[in-house]
Amino acid sequence: MSPKTLYDKIWDAHVADEAEDGTCLLYIDRHLVHEVTSPQAFEGLRMTGRTVRAPDKTIAVPDHNVPTTLDRANAATMTEDSRVQVEALDTNAKEFGIHYYPVSDVRQGIVHIVGPEQGWTLPGMTVVCGDSHTATHGAFGALAHGIGTSEVEHVLATQTLIQRKGKNMKVEITGKLRPGVTAKDITLSVIGETGTAGGTGYVIEYCGEAIRDLSMEGRMTVCNMAIEGGARAGLIAPDEKTFEYCKGRPHAPKGAQWEAAMDWWKTLYSDDDAHWDKVVTLRGEDIAPVVTWGTSPEDVLPITASVPAASDFAGGKVAAAQRSLDYMGLTAGTPLTDVTIDTVFIGSCTNGRIEDLRAAAAILKGKKIKEGMRAMVVPGSGLVRAQAEEEGLADIFIEAGFEWRLAGCSMCLAMNPDQLAPGERCAATSNRNFEGRQGRGGRTHLMSPAMAAAAAVTGKLTDVREMM
Amino acid sequence: MNKFTTLSGIAAPLDLINIDTDMIIPKQFLKTIKRSGLGVNLFDEMRYDDDRNEIPEFVLNKPQYRDAQILVAGDNFGCGSSREHAPWAIADFGITCVIAPSYADIFYNNCFKNGILPIVLPQEQVDVLMKDAEKGANARIEIDLESQSITTSDGEVFTFEVDAFKKHCLMNGLDDIGLTMEKAAAIDTFEAAATQSRPWV
């Protein structure tokens, strides 16, 4: 048999039909659904008299719109249109008989955090969701990617997706990370290297010692941002850490089925002589704590650097960089550590897991946030929130001056009331620094949870290594 | 779905790289439960000021481009989110063809589900079309999907590549779900076998 990559193996195990021209029907093992990209799909089913083919494999949770303030049980905390969207999901979940975690359920949270937490996401699966950060689930060695609403409807109706196979890209991070450098710094540095279109048409497999050394939480952070590098999916071969994470989760297999699953999962790795269409290698030792300065996730620099000039770039990037600098209100040559911050947001499907909160709390312990700073922690799920309270992390955040919120997507995309005002500058652990992403005119600098915590204390972009 | 066969229309130039889905349709407009009506909010934050007045410099606010049916843009168009609201807004505005050197994958696929033809051309040819588009309302660009060709207002012809299956669906306005359901037997067979070999799924 010819050698295969991990992506090849998962792909081959899920092709339900292949047409002569190579167009395939890929069978979908898990379909995750949230309130923003699904109402039109369910409506489409109703209009055509179709049903959900595999309700047992379909899991819904509202996350994008939901308020994260403690009073959210009061419907008045939601705008009318948000409320309509969440209620539509309530109704659709009930009517079509799919698994559902409503806002009132402690297990509710960001769909990409709930899926793994509940054991829905397992190695070797195909996972889709009407959300580009579905790539997160690739951390388990699953083929996971975002789809549009028409495709959501297609998967609901047929449990398959019309696909052509992508190309294979290997991103290897060799060696060890230095202190203060995290999974977020890896994934941002990779995008800085490849650009936001570098992965277009590819599925990325992340490998190498620095990736193996990451926890499952860290691996999810890395895969989460594969899409920011242009790749629809990023994945990491499962290993003992993966199996350990999955074992005992509510929807993970048990007993003999667990053993059978393990037998297959252990075959899920790229063969030594597999073919790669593209290879990118970074040395773990070379990666520094990084921040973004512009309005594209590829605008990444080590925290020790200065704001670049548009003239440092070439081609279409010159105009784009100038537009970014104007939007961000930054002057070329300014040391990044001189940039003052108004707001800190810790959360999102990129960095809203327990390890992220631990890393931020480790920096904040015994410290206060800068006077006048607005700072919030939005745990990725109700269960992450509960665990953080149990571990005493919530107290550290509250004593430091952070707001301790309920779970949701929150200020990552600012569809709920958590938004930046025009000109407000935010240190964010989320995934996109696009113009207007966190609120019209808002200015976003992406970074790791530890870096965001450090910025909250000093009121400026800060090298976290100076606070360790 | 609306068919796409030929188009002769005005092209609006938007000479920026990395035009993301938040620019195309900001999140506050994703709260709809319909597919229609988003055209008025296409490129909302670039198109209107804080008081909801049109910004006259923005290309789609200029008189000559208000009825544009084609958009010519820079590299990596549609990067970011999977929101299909982006192609919905573009189509609702009346644009049914985008021309750029490259697209983000998810956006590219979403276009075909909504009667929009996203054309990929080399940068040099996009540059020619960008200049053509800058001429305004008198410069109509012609697109023929059958022959996979674009004719500039000066009569220059470029050809483009498109996946045969996607082309077939777009030219005939076919519904993907209906097509897939014709293969229900293959899905049934696969599902039965998978349930045997991977019962935990």
Image (cartoon, grey):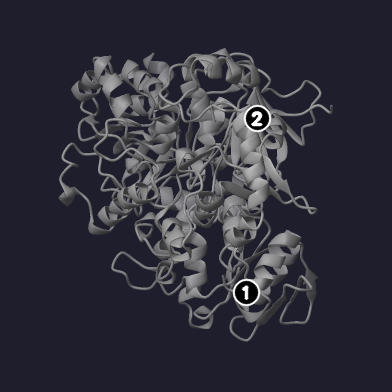
Kindly identify the amino acid type of the residue bearing the numbered disc 1: Lys
* In the displayed structure image, the side of residue A296 where residue A72 appears, left or right: left
Note whether residue A359 is visible. yes
| Tag shown at residue A273 | none
Task: Please give the chain letter of the residue carrying mark 1.
Answer: B
Instruction: Name the residue rendered at 43%, 52% in the picture.
Output: A435
* In the displayed structure image, the side of residue B16 where residue A117 appears, left or right: left
Kindly identify the amino acid type of the residue bearing the numbered disc 2: Glu
Q: Nearer the viewer, residue B198 or A228?
A: B198
Residue under circle 2? A205
Instruction: Name the residue rendered at 35%, 54% in the picture.
Output: A440
Residue under circle 1? B3
The kind of secondary structure element at disc 2 is strand
Residue A149, above or below A361:
below
Q: Within the image, what quadrant is residue B166 found in?
A: bottom right
Across and down, in percent, residue A315 comes to 66, 53
Instruction: Name the residue rendered at 68%, 58% in the picture.
Output: B101
Across and down, in percent, residue A274 comes to 79, 27
Q: Nearer the viewer, residue A296 or A126?
A: A126
* In the displayed structure image, the side of residue A127 where residue B128 appears, left or right: right
Across and down, in percent, residue A343 comes to 29, 38
